[in-house]
Image: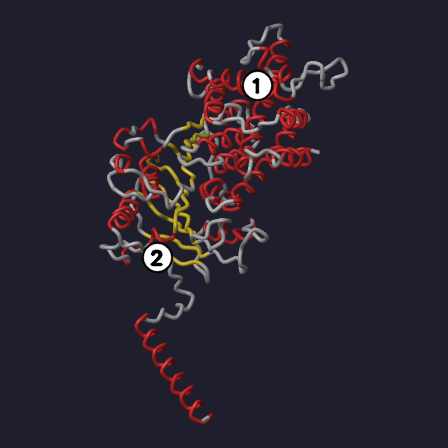
Amino acid sequence: MYEQVFRNIDDILRKEAGCTTELDYTEQSSWILFLKYLDGLEQDKADAEALVGKDYNYILEQEFRWSVWAAPKNAKGEIDYNKALTGPDFIEFVDGKLFPYLKGFKQRATGPNTIEYKIGEIFGEIKNKITSGYNLREIANLVDQLQFRSQVDKHELSHLYEAKIKNMGNAGRNGGEYYTPRPLIRAMIQVIQPTIGEKIYDGAVGSAGFLCESHDHLLASKKLTTKDLKTLQEKTFYGKEKKSLAYVIAIMNMILHGIEAPNIIHTNTLTENLADIQDKDRFDIILANPPFGGKERPEVQQNFPIKTGETAYLFLQHFIKMLKAGGRAGVVIKNTFLSNTDNASVSLRKLLLESCNLHTVLDCPGGTFLGAGVKTVVLFFEKGSPTKKTWYYQLDPGRNMGKTNPLNDADLAEFIELQKSFAVGESSWMLKMKDVDQTTFDLSTKNPHKKAEAALRDPNEILEEMKALDKESAEILKSIKALLK
């Protein structure tokens, strides 16, 4: 049923002039879903308080609760159309009253980790793009059918929401910003093996895929106590996100995975000066796929010892600094990082190798990230001791990957198994740091078990051959013309 509801919502949004892409559909459904979720959360808390004879202090004033503005019901439990707003009146209420009221929570909240602050942050960042009150009424009626009360409901909704994020990621050339393939994330988590009580961080959180998958992994890892569940809720997952849309989606995605008030801050992570980071700010685990190809302003670069405009290189410096001693990380980065000869690349590789044990490099094939043609690697490292040797694995699913045949869990099964013992085989090898050039620190993925591809020919040689062929063709044409005379 829920899948059809999601599909119907998208069909209505397609009629809206202000909603033209999958990004718009996800954004607009997100704020409505969030308010429906909030209503269910408040009702659950009110019921719990009533059981012990207490009154619950609602977060939202009555006028702004879902059951009043979005879905007023009659005695039969059906939408009461005598009270339900629609048409221009509905849009006027949402744009003129609801959004300004919700935005104001940011100033009224006691701190950034409260649900009140999240409400203010979300509604301060996005706008209602639905201009038809009749369309909005249809959508509100559909969303009202969704329930967030049971774990089964949340589980189904989280899967559907993940599918929306995946479609959004596939829709544009910057899809990788929003969607890291879940099989790759799960494989990274299998290598890192987080445990209850460890703090997990993603400073480029995107749609919170790493945090959500880590949550699911920890939830299934053992029978959790009440204390464990409280730790998962409040003191395990942390993230930062610069972009407004991604921030909203990350919050909603984590809520659907069971985290009531996600510890995600809306900020540009890279504006934080590395020199100001103290031990209390650090984390046990970092899992991330920072944006690559972006450029940061010179004033942002001043926060880092290795100056570069490449966003991913700044993030890698940030992650190294944010790890506790003994902390573990899995970070996706462009494979050119391993071999680039510019000063920043060389200096960053040197920093990584000297301050961390880069124990594993997973070489991913082209097409791993749908909508993005770049080749990537995953760096797995532990902070505190220098690298002595690095195990490489070259992932080869044996097919061209795309939207119809994306990366799957089975593709990564061998990597996960071999990585446990750093086994060497046809697709894996070990690189000793004593064999690495100590001036360039080149860490290129060159599989010694496979024949090297034929070297590319010199361009001048190719041009000379083309000239010779042109000359030969001209001579042949000249001979043919002579014969025809």
In the displayed structure image, the side of residue 348 where residue 234 appears, left or right: right
What colour scheme has been applied to the protein in the rendered image? secondary structure
Residue 378 drawn above or below residue 31: below
Image coords of residue 405 (percent x, y): 58, 53
Say which quarter of the image contains residue 55.
Answer: top right
In the displayed structure image, the side of residue 302 where residue 1 appears, left or right: right
At a point 38% along the width and 29% down the height, the residue shown is 267
Mark 1, secondary structure of its residue: helix
For the view shown, which residue lies furthest in the right direction? 76
Provide the residue designation for mark 2.
444
For the residue pair 243 and 282, the one nearer the viewer reads as 243
Image coords of residue 255 (percent x, y): 54, 28
In the displayed structure image, the side of residue 3 where residue 418 appears, left or right: left
Residue 59 drawn above or below residue 321: above
At a point 56% along the width and 25% down the height, the residue shown is 34
For the residue pair 279 and 406, the one nearer the viewer reads as 406
For the residue pair 282 and 148, the one nearer the viewer reads as 148
| Cα gap from disc 2 to disc 1, whole angstroms | 59 Å
The three-letter code of the residue at mark 2 reads: Ser
Checking the image for residue 92, the label placed there is 1
At a point 33% along the width and 37% down the height, the residue shown is 318
For the residue pair 419 and 271, the one nearer the viewer reads as 271
Mark 2, secondary structure of its residue: loop
Dot 1 crowding, Cα within 10 Å, few <14, some 14–19, many 20+: some
The three-letter code of the residue at mark 1 reads: Glu
